[in-house]
Image (spheres, rainbow, N blue to C red):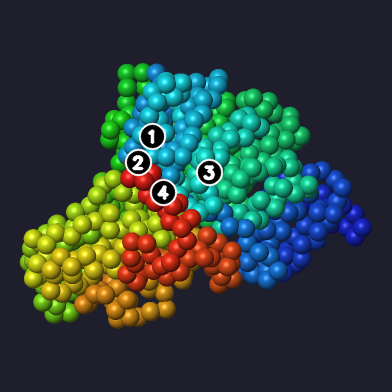
Amino acid sequence: VGIMLLKGRPCMLGGACRVERRAVLVQASSQPAMRSASRCMQQSMTSTGSSFVNSAGLKLQVMVQHAKGTSRMAQPTRAVRRFAPRMCGIVGIFKRQGNVNVELYEALLMLQHRGQDSAGMVTTDSLKFREYKENGLVKDVFANQSILDTMVGNSGIAHVRYPTAGSSSAQEAQPFFVNSPLGIYLIHNGNLTNADDMREILNSSRSFFNRHLRTDSDSEVLLNVLADEVHRAHQRCLQTTGCDPNRNKTEFLFEAGATAMRMLQGAYSCLSLVQGVGLVGFRDPFGIRPLVLGKRTTPAGDEWCMASEDCAFGPIGFVRVRDVNPGEMIIISQDGTMLSRQLAAPTLSPCIFEYIYLARPDSVLNKIPVYNFQMKLGSRLAQRIKSRNWDLDLICPVPDGSRPSAIQMAADMGLPYREGLVKNRYVGRTFIMPDQKLREISVRRKLNAMSVVFEGKNVLLVDDSIVRGTTMSQIVSMVRNAGAAKVYLASAAPPVRFPNVYGVDMPTRKEFVAHDLTEEQICEKLGADGLIYQTVDDLIEIGKEMNPEIIDFDASCFDGKYCTGDIDEAYLQQLELKGRGALRTRAGQEATLLGTTPSTAYLGSAFRSLETVNAN
């Protein structure tokens, strides 16, 4: 644990604190250092001197507060502004020759599972940016060939996002842009947990470059923090060494990235296009969200791609090189040179929910093949199910994510594997629908149970995870109605009891079917004859066996242990009081087509939304 102390001459009583522009790390246990930092902070905030000194004081306030072991949510009078986290997919490509637009489009199609609400793209020929973004699926946003034709340039980035309440406008679709310094576009996968503090610094009159933010998106906050630090690096260059800024733009980015990583908290895997620099990718020091580097060798030289998952590489001919390291920034210069620098000490703690639900099975994240990981989940569950002595006739997956686990369970237990649930592939994923009642209404359109498979059988249904229970409770009912004698449930994931604050749409505890309930109570609520969950210990042990380099996984949605160390009970309570889930209730009870007694206005809106989903 440490704080950032801005190194400078000792503050004299009644005098200004002259602060140098270099930061050093000191131990938080050093009380004299803490008091010195506080005095410098207070004087710099009240000083009428340079904007750099004033902003440094605000930054130091954030850092000192964290060093004291208190989060911003420990302040009882401060309400949290809710920056809607979102699961996203990002990709960036550099080519030696030709336009990159079609390949960005193809890569986005491979990442569509990470977001179905909006899509955006920006390309550049090193002279001019071309941008387009809109709500909808990738194929619909770019359905007009004339739009893609305008996206010329040999380098570009693209983004898909999934819906979250209060953030469905096209204005909040990515990429985001600032025209100064240089001209920077940025896309982001993850969620900042200290976006309030960062927004306060950016909006403050004491900041270096007072910035107006147009949206509530934490991605826009992140972009402006980075841009603000590029400005500072530029000013240091002019004021201290007299260097030529035009020759040091790449160094400005590395320097700004290092400072931003000391300030930002939470999860962020980012790609950026920077005028005069090139394609930039970086990942938070914990590596919570994935980011993978790929390469394609051509007669003209090596070409580069960075994406959330390497499943995006295959269709466009790139080969996986490695994961972007936690705390690393990679810059692909405008001439195609790949530059890399470690900007923060890495503590690899990837989100384990990526391997269970979010990522495609044909992806490899942090050197772990997702498919193999899911197979091992099935083996661990099979061992534990054998001790239950359930009388089972067959194993059936809940499509699609549970198939690898179910296949392996059937093989280990010597039971028939059957596909008894038919999926309507033209209905969106219910888990990522923004409204609870829309999820309930769409479940029965999503799946259909086959009597020829279930009639008279004792069935074990396998799902990758059970989050809200909306889908599962209705599936159990459907399978019984299809003639099953008994219905048992197995979840390849442990019970979800805590919100994932790092970019997955499950922010409040009261939404979870497992919240404050025992396994037996959950089983009763879901209407099953038996229920078994994966254990957290088995989950993490599998991951560490497959990649011993991983220090630990973030399994916070299962065990409540948040790897960034800045999440406390007050923060979680604020999510429930002020966040997107404030009006949500626990799922898990069987819903009718119309749910409870919604208003006529709501039903009209709901069915219009469903028509849009089915059309997509």
Give whichever of 608, 384 is nearer the camera: 608
Q: Residue 616 carries which label?
A: 2
Q: Which mark is residue 609?
A: 4
CA separation in Å, label 1 and label 3: 16 Å
Query: Label 2 crowding class (10 Å Cα cut-off): few <14, some 14-19, many 20+?
Result: some
Is 319 left or right of 287, judged from the image as shown?
left
CA separation in Å, label 2 and label 4: 11 Å
Kindly indicate whether the residue at mark 4 contacts the one at mark 2 (C-beta within 8 angstroms).
no
SS for dot 1: helix
SS for dot 3: loop
Kindly indicate whether the residue at mark 3 contacts the one at mark 4 (C-beta within 8 angstroms).
no
Query: Which quadrant, please, contains the N terminus?
Result: bottom right
SS for dot 4: helix
Where residue 171 sits in the image (x, y, percent)? 56, 40
Where residue 577 sits in the image (x, y, percent)? 58, 68
- Give the mark nearest the N terminus, 4 or 3: 3
Residue drawn at x 18%, y 68% is: 481
Kindly indicate whether the residue at mark 2 contacts the one at mark 1 (C-beta within 8 angstroms).
yes
Query: Which quadrant, please, contains the C terminus?
Result: top left
Q: In which quarter of the image is residue 551?
A: bottom left
Where residue 457 sits in the image (x, y, percent)? 9, 70
Instruction: State the residue position of label 1.
Output: 140
CA separation in Å, label 4 and label 3: 15 Å
- Give the mark nearest the N terminus, 2 or 4: 4
Residue drawn at x 72%, y 65% is: 34
Q: Which of marks 2 and 4 is in front?
A: 4
The kind of residue tagged 4 is Ser
The kind of residue tagged 2 is Asn
